[in-house]
Image (tube, rainbow, N blue to C red):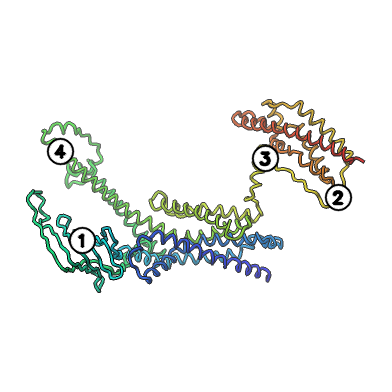
Amino acid sequence: MRRIKRLHTFMLQTFLPLFLMTFGICLFIVLMQFIWRYIDDMVGKGLDLPVLGEMFLYAALFLIPMALPLAILLASLMTFGNLGERLELLAMKSAGVSLIRIMQPLTVLVAAISVGAFFFQNNAMPVIQVKLYSLLYSIRQKSPELDIPEGTFYNEITGYNVYVKHKDRETGLLRNIMIYDYANGFNNANIMVADSGRLKTSADKLFLILSLYNGESFANLRDQSDVTGSMKAVPYRRESFKSRDILIEFDENFTRTDESFLQNQYIGKNLVNLQHSIDSMNVRLDSVRSFNAKDVVQMSYKKSFADRAYPGDKDKIVQARDKTMVINFDSLYEAKSKENKITLLARSKAAIENLKSDYFFRASSLDDEAYKVRRHKTEWHNKFTVSFACLIFFFIGAPLGAIIRKGGLGTPVVISVFLFIFYYVINNIGFKMARDGIWSAWEGMWLSSAVLAPLGIFLTYKAAHDSVILNSDTYLNAIKKLFGKKEGRKIERKEVIIYYPDYKDIRLRLTGLIKNCQGYISGHKRWIHYIRFWENGGRDYNAEMIAKEMESIVEELSNSDQNLVLNKLMDYPIISGYMKINARINNKTGITVGMFIPVGVPLYLLAVYQRKLLRHDIEMVKKASEDMAEIIDSEKLIT
């Protein structure tokens, strides 16, 4: 029991520092992404440090659900990668501790983190989102900090365009000023020119005070309401002044937006409030849809005609409504005069347009209400998906680290970023599908979990069974076997030779092998008879006999202590791949498959290609056997 407790302590001490480090890094990265996204709303506003600090604090708390799954993935991947790289994982497995048992303490820890993430999403996130979005809205509404550039017109002051040719940085004096005041409209613009001036803000920061010196002003006296376009001379006013003060409304204060309007939105509600809002909105939607459906029936021609024909008599209205009424509109229309026809068409067109506008308005209202319901539902499911993503990423990262056995910040970071981008893209696709009503809310929000959960189960199963799914040789050998090839033979010199081979017997067997190869090469045909191929089950018994004999000789010679013999063994090809593939086809199966031409022809062509390769391998066996016989004779190994 003490050993297991020490193992748990060791795993927690290994995982927690990496988790805290990766969580800090991931949170910093997503926070930088948030800042770049809203940088245009913050620059040039003259915000105080407390306001910026408050916004960064809320933004960091808001981004915790995004950084937490990535941090768990990266930390688990690095933890088990380091253990595998330092052979500590191998030592634990050698002691009889399975990978699932090794992951057990971290599984409990990650489950606790997931539960904490759920309560954070449900209780803290509504408050954080309301404060963050209200603060961002207040920042957007704040007027930009006044900084008039040199040599260009500045139009950030509402109703004014200001041009300053030069600014004295030391005294704050503005020189060669030109001001266009179009607060009363462009036709009644007031133009002021001054040699110099100063700009300052009032004590309450609600007004700008612009003091001008040695200038002139020009004003158009024509009434803006005069739109006759007459060519009469337009009166104007020109004034010269030594000094003049202009008071301009310009609020530089930072005013916080009331948070109450966001608290009633989906971002400011927990699970209970979201469910209550969804139920109430669904009831309202159902009632509106029912009312619209009844109204469509009421506005139908059959209903309207019956009501007009029998006003106040319900029985006759029902009977008339149930009857099939055939009316020749063309004859009624042709009976009217030309003026009445025009009047009827105009009234019909107006009635149709009004009805169309009414239905469009109702449809847009229903779409808005349905959109609110969908956003509430997506937010409801989002409370759970983040917690579940933490568990999924742990069961992806931990077994993946045990498989690749690479620690540090190299390979784990690359794999983690790739998997998280894949998760982020799938999650956004599902969210947009659910938001737009294409999919149900639960289908869209749980799409990423449904895609990644099988991957986590598969990796955990493979890691628990010491699989080599990330070994490139495994896939290369599988491709080689598909085309009748096999991985190359590697003969290493043994430190201890149990027995020496009988070179005299091997020499005789090599002679027989060479003759068999020669006979096979001379009698081998490049093409295979289609029917005979399927009758024999696709097998080449002569090649099988040569392969078995060759493998037996190679196995016995591998115990030799002669370097020349061991080196020559590397020249023997592997010719058993063709037989291993085709041996699975027995006679009955071959005849059955051969009857289906579309199925049998591809397999037949593949066999033809493999037998061409097989002929080359038999030639290599003959050449290597002849060389081996010469080595045995020249080295005088026969005693």
| Pointer 3 with pointer 2, Cβ within 8 A | no
Q: Is residue 8 above or below residue 406?
A: below
Of 178 and 536, the residue lying toward us: 178
- The kind of residue on which mark 3 rests is Lys
Please give left or right for residue 559 compared with residue 120 in the image. Answer: right
Residue identifier under label 3: 481
Q: Earlier in the sequence, mark 3 or mark 1?
A: 1
Occupied quadrant, residue 400:
bottom right
> Which image quarter is the N terminus in?
bottom right
Marks 3 and 4, Cα distance to the nearest angstrom? Answer: 83 Å
| Pointer 4 with pointer 2, Cβ within 8 A | no
Please give left or right for residue 175 compared with residue 509 in the image. Answer: left
Q: Position of residue 383 (x, y in %)?
A: 45, 61
Q: Is residue 126 above or below residue 223?
A: below
Of 126 and 617, the residue lying toward us: 617
Q: Is residue 218 above or below residue 313?
A: below
- The kind of residue on which mark 2 rests is Ile
Q: Residue furthest bottom?
A: 203
- The kind of residue on which mark 1 rests is Ile
